[in-house]
Amino acid sequence: MLKHDTGAVLDAIRSTTAAAEAGAAVYASSATSNVVVCPSSTATAGVISGQHNGSISRTLVSTDAQTTLKGSDIHAAASSASAEVLLRQELEEKLWSQTKELASEQRSASAVKKALASARAELAAAQERRRSDRDNLRTAQQAAKRDIKTAERMADEVSHAARADFEWRIGEMRAKIQAELREQLDALQISMEAEARRADAAEAERSRLYDKMEGIICARDRG
């Protein structure tokens, strides 16, 4: 688009300076000759023809009325044409410089757009990774909560089992101790009963011996 517009401007400049360049060509061939400007229906400026050796004439095609110009007028026109040519060259150089600057700016803008698109793509990828990480973290947290609940349930079960086992063992130990104590008490009771029987037998024997001694003493006293 930029190159097309610049070319149109340059074409317009070339069209406006065509007549001046034609006048400069006339002056270059014969600066002191007369010039006849004739009307024409097919061009605005352009063809100049000439004859030398005393019958010199120059014909400039134009839409104006027929006019005879002198060499001084042609010189002025040529100078003006040269100035216009220089101006045109300067304008072309400026336009070309501006075209290069605009092209450079367009390349810079294109590079900026590409960098911006790349940054947006990277941002979108980072956001997607962040969403994925957040989802993974949420999944890990849920799994950790389930594991914690399972561990707590297992700990409760182990605690209940340990408590039941402990109570069972305590009951077993209590029953065993009670049985042992009962056996010891029974043995002690048997021993005490035997001791009592022995004491009773000894007391009876002592009483029998005492009675026997009294009988002997009484018999001795009578005799």
Image: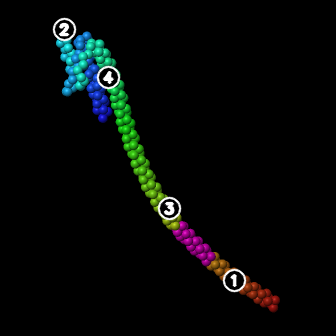
Say which residue label 4 marks.
88
Question: Mark 3 Cα within 10 Å, few/some/many (few <14, many 20+)?
Answer: few
Quadrant containing the C terminus in the rendered view: bottom right
The dot on residue 54 is 2
The dot on residue 51 is none
Amino acid type of disc 2?
Gly
Q: Could you say where residue 2 lies in the image, as x and y percent from the top left?
A: 32, 33
In this rendering, does residue 33 appear at all? yes
Query: Does label 2 or label 1 sit earlier along the sequence?
Result: 2
Q: Is residue 169 magenta?
A: yes
- 76 or 106: nearer the eye? 76
Query: Does label 4 or label 1 sit earlier along the sequence?
Result: 4
Say which residue label 1 marks.
200
Amino acid type of disc 3?
Glu
Magenta-tinted stretch: 163-186
Q: Could you say where residue 150 lies in the image, as x and y percent from the top left?
A: 47, 61
Q: CA distance from mark 4 to mark 1?
A: 161 Å
Question: Mark 2 Cα within 10 Å, few/some/many (few <14, many 20+)?
Answer: few
Looking at the image, is 7 positioned above or below residue 128? above
User: Tags 4 and 2 in contact by the CB under 8 Å rule?
Assistant: no
The dot on residue 152 is 3
Residue visible at 65% across and 80% down?
193
Amino acid type of disc 1?
Asp
Residue visible at 39% across and 45% down?
125
Q: Could you say where residue 205 lies in the image, as x and y percent from the top left?
A: 70, 84
